[in-house]
Amino acid sequence: MYKLDVLENGLKVVTEPMSGMESASIGIWIRAGGRYENKSNSGISHILEHLLFKGTTTRDMITIKQEIEGRGGSFNGFTSEEHTCYLVKVLSKDTELGVDILSDMILNPKLAEDELEKEKSVIIEEINMYKDMPSHYVHEILAEMMWPDQPLGMPLAGTVETVRAVTRQDVVNYRQKNYNTKNMLVVATGKVEPAVLMKLCRQYLNSAEEAQASVFEKVKLEQKIPGVKLITKDTEQTHVAIGLHAVDRFSPDKHVLSLINILLGANMSSRLFHKVRDEMALCYEISSSIRRYEDTGAFVVSAGVDDKKLLKAIEIILKELSRMTKEPVGKDELVRAKEYYKGQLLFALEDTMSHMLWMGEKFISGEKDFSVKDILQRIDKVDAGDLLRVSAEMFTESNLNLSVIGPIKNDLAMKAEFHIR
């Protein structure tokens, strides 16, 4: 069972001891990400995350790597739409080192001008690389369609123009605004005790400043007709992404949505994989996924298909979505989906790092359901009627968005095919 403590400076500290483990996974979470940016500084959260690995006022970047990896540990960071996280996994005996390194990066980053320019070049190459990867870029296009002129629809890495324009002072100001105890959370799971972690946090993070909590722009959903964007590019495969607005992470229907995702495309026994790939051989790769945010969500189907099979693949995908709104899911199929959902959750929670990421994302977002037993019971309570209801609300023609990248020739024909029957 987890324990939540709060430092004198307002920093929240969450510990979940896990019996039988030898490792401790520690993360410092920040409420800073793509949704806290605007059109002029798009990508700055990602830039700052990169810079924190480039050295502090007391350690250079080589020392940071050697101190963690020299003890058999690993460390990383990531930026998402709503959060940034810096994390380490170490043996329990090295927990203090993990907290020391992470707090040093958060509180004392060097933010050197020359390193900023190097990272801007690296990130610009990353942006260009993604544009040359249609399987990735098609999702950027889809996000822009679903949340036009909003931070949620902007690419996390920014654009070449916004990255080039970022100055060191911009980075310093952004960090000062967002990296404070109102926006921060420390989470540790594994072989670590709450009292030990609190002592270390007091030692290394007591100087973190308290300030105002950051606020992002609430999403605006104004879609009334299907959206289609086609990009002609000479590729070997045509890449497709279909997106629909869905429930947010706090919705009581979030587990229903997860089961719909499993039934349709989350694994090899799913309907889309079986029908579109195995039975009709319309593609090599097809899957579905969910994006969860604090005030909205998305259900996404993605596939790579032969250009000549594109229209047929889209037609079959949409028929399968429509089927979810009309035909109750059979008892055996629903049981298999529930068992897969529960099994994947329990498997993930056996690993200290996966457990820390699960706990951290929930806590930093403000979720309240941390009892695995209760979550499993909620999953079991979902019935075929719930699946029909949520599918009918989500799989509507006015909620559809389609982005396609490939050697497209007959775009009018495709637009004609883009509707749920």
Image (cartoon, helix red, strand yellow):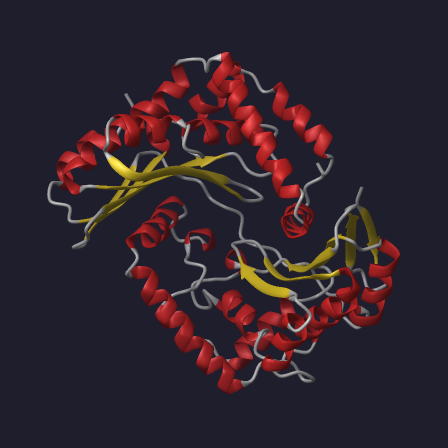
Would you identify the image quadrant in which residue 159 lies?
bottom left
Assign the C terminus to one quadrant of the image.
top left
Residue lying at the far left of the rendered structure = 409
Counting labels gives: 0
Is 305 left, or right, of 358 in this rendering?
left
Observer-nearest of 354 and 120: 354
* Residue found 75% across the figure and 71% down from its top: 100
Query: Relative to 94, does residue 12 appear above or below in the rendering?
Result: above
In this rendering, is residue 165 above or below 177? below
For this view, does 85 lie left or right of residue 116? Answer: right
Residue ranking furthest to the bottom:
114
Across and down, in percent, residue 28 comes to 68, 61
Q: Quadrant of residue 127?
A: bottom left
Image location (x, y in percent) of residue 313:
24, 32
Q: Quadrant of residue 53?
A: bottom right
Instruction: Give the vertical position of 181 relative to 54 (above or below).
Output: above
Q: Residue at x 63, y 77 (%)?
A: 66
Instruction: Determine whether, in the image, residue 395 is placed left or right of residue 62.
Output: left
The answer to whether residue 172 is visible is yes
Quarter of the image with the N terminus is: top right
Q: Residue 72's spot in the image, x, y percent?
A: 66, 67
Horizontal side of 130 relative to 384 (left or right) equals: left
Instruction: Using the rendered image of the protein, determine whether residue 254 is visible from the camera's viewpoint.
Output: no
x and y percentages locating residue 11 in the rendered image:
78, 60
